[in-house]
Amino acid sequence: MPTTRRRTPRPPTPESLRQQVVLEEHDLAPDGSFAIVTRRSVEGEEYVSHLWLVPLDGDGAEPRRLTSGTVRDMEPRIAPDGTRVAFTRSTPAGGRHDLRT
């Protein structure tokens, strides 16, 4: 029986942490055709979060970024009719939370 060498995990480095992307929150459309996902990453020296629309109907469409900027967009909620998305936005410097649609 061959011996398998296990790789020893490396501790994270500042650079490897900056490259991580985390999907944090989501909401599913009432008809199940798409989801809105919060994607967190690092840009420059700041954590940012943006909303992405992820098609789920199997037609091969690519995910689409809905928001941008040096902001933290969070807590997406899709309207019951599926036509709008509400979410909160804060800025890294101000920490202020706004409700957006």
Image (cartoon, rainbow, N blue to C red):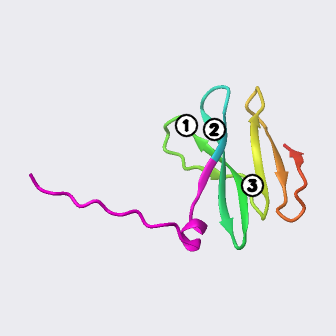
Which dot marks residue 33?
none
Please tell me whether residue 59 belongs to the stretch shown in magenta.
no
Looking at numbered disc 1 in the image, what kind of residue is underneath it? Leu
- The secondary structure making up most of the magenta span is loop
Residue 19 vs residue 38, the one in the foreground? 19
Q: Label 1: few (<14), some or many (≥20) within 10 Å?
A: some
* Tag 2–tag 3 contact (CB < 8 Å): no
Tag 1 near tag 3, CB within 8 Å? no
Please give the range of residues in magenta.
1-23
10 Å neighbourhood of mark 2: few (<14), some, or many (≥20)? many
Q: Secondary structure at mark 3?
A: loop
- Check if mark 1's residue and mark 2's residue have beta carbons within 8 Å: yes
Q: Is residue 89 left or right of residue 27?
A: right
| Disc 1 to disc 3, C-alpha distance | 19 Å
When asked about the image quadrant of residue 16, the answer is bottom right
Q: Measure how far apart labels 2 and 3 are at the Cα level.
A: 15 Å
Q: Position of residue 85 (x, y in %)?
A: 77, 39
Residue bearing mark 2: 35
Residue topped by disc 1: 56
Question: Above or below — where is 83 with respect to 64?
Answer: above
**Where does label 3 land, which residue?**
67
Question: What is the three-letter code of the residue carrying label 3?
Answer: Thr
Question: Nearer the N terminus, badge 1 or badge 2?
Answer: 2
Quadrant assignment for the C terminus: top right
Q: CA distance from mark 1 to mark 2?
A: 7 Å
